[in-house]
Image (tube, rainbow, N blue to C red):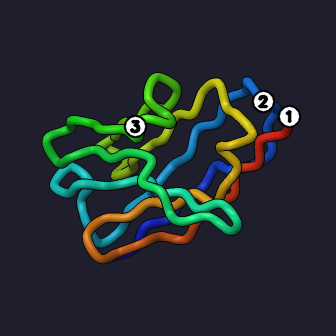
Amino acid sequence: VQLQASGGGLVQAGGSLRLSCAASGMLVMFNAVGWYRQAPGKQRELVGLITREGSTKYADSVKGRFTISRDNTKNTVYLQMNSLEPEDTAAYYCSSGTTRGQGTLVTVSS
């Protein structure tokens, strides 16, 4: 099982980015997938998750700004991030079960 996050980059505050989590060796439609982030010197934080039934949950810090979705045909989970803030700067990665993918860096400038 592998998960690969991509789509990170540098964006100004107020901007948007969409991260992708491409899965192989597993089907996202049958597994819960979570998005996490970790900023330098800070603890890892669960940003949100999508259950295998398709329902989503979010951390209070991103609620209303971030949206998780899933494309079963592409076996990919997305994290749409709007109204980005400098505090969102972190390495973002996706995880399912015991599998954690490589992260993608998001930097939000003020």
Q: Nearer the viewer, mark 1 or mark 3?
A: 1
- 1 and 2 marks in contact (CB < 8 Å): yes
| Residue at x 70%, y 66% (from the top left corner) | 40
* Nearer-N-terminus badge (1/3): 3
Q: Earlier in the sequence, mark 1 or mark 2?
A: 2
Amino acid type at circle 2 is Ala
Measured Cα–Cα span from mark 1 to mark 3:
24 Å
Which type of secondary structure does the marked residue at label 1 adopt?
loop
Separation of residues labelled 2 and 3 (CA atoms): 20 Å
Q: Residues within 10 Å of mark 2 (few under 14, many from 20)?
A: some
Q: Position of residue 47 (x, y in %)?
A: 45, 47
Compared to residue 60, the image places residue 50 above or below, namely below
Identity of the residue drawn at 38% across and 45% down: 48
Question: Which label lies toward us, 2 or 3?
Answer: 2
Q: Which residue is mark 3?
A: 68
Q: Residues within 10 Å of mark 3 (few under 14, many from 20)?
A: many
Identify the amino acid type marked 3. Ile
Q: Nearer the viewer, residue 19 or 15?
A: 15
Query: What is the C-alpha distance between the residues marked 1 and 2?
Result: 5 Å
Disc 1 crowd rating (10 Å Cα; few below 14, some 14-19, many 20+) is few
To which residue does mark 2 refer? Answer: 13
As drawn, 57 above or below 91: above
Task: Name the image quarter holding the C terminus.
Answer: top right
Q: Amino acid at mark 1?
A: Ser
Residue 38: horizontal and vertical position, in percent?
A: 58, 62
What secondary structure is found at the residue carrying circle 2? loop
Q: Mark 1 — residue?
A: 110
Contact between marks 2 and 3 (CB within 8 A): the answer is no
Q: Quadrant of residue 94?
A: bottom left
Q: Is residue 23 left or right of residue 6?
A: left
For the point 54% across and 57% down, the residue is 37
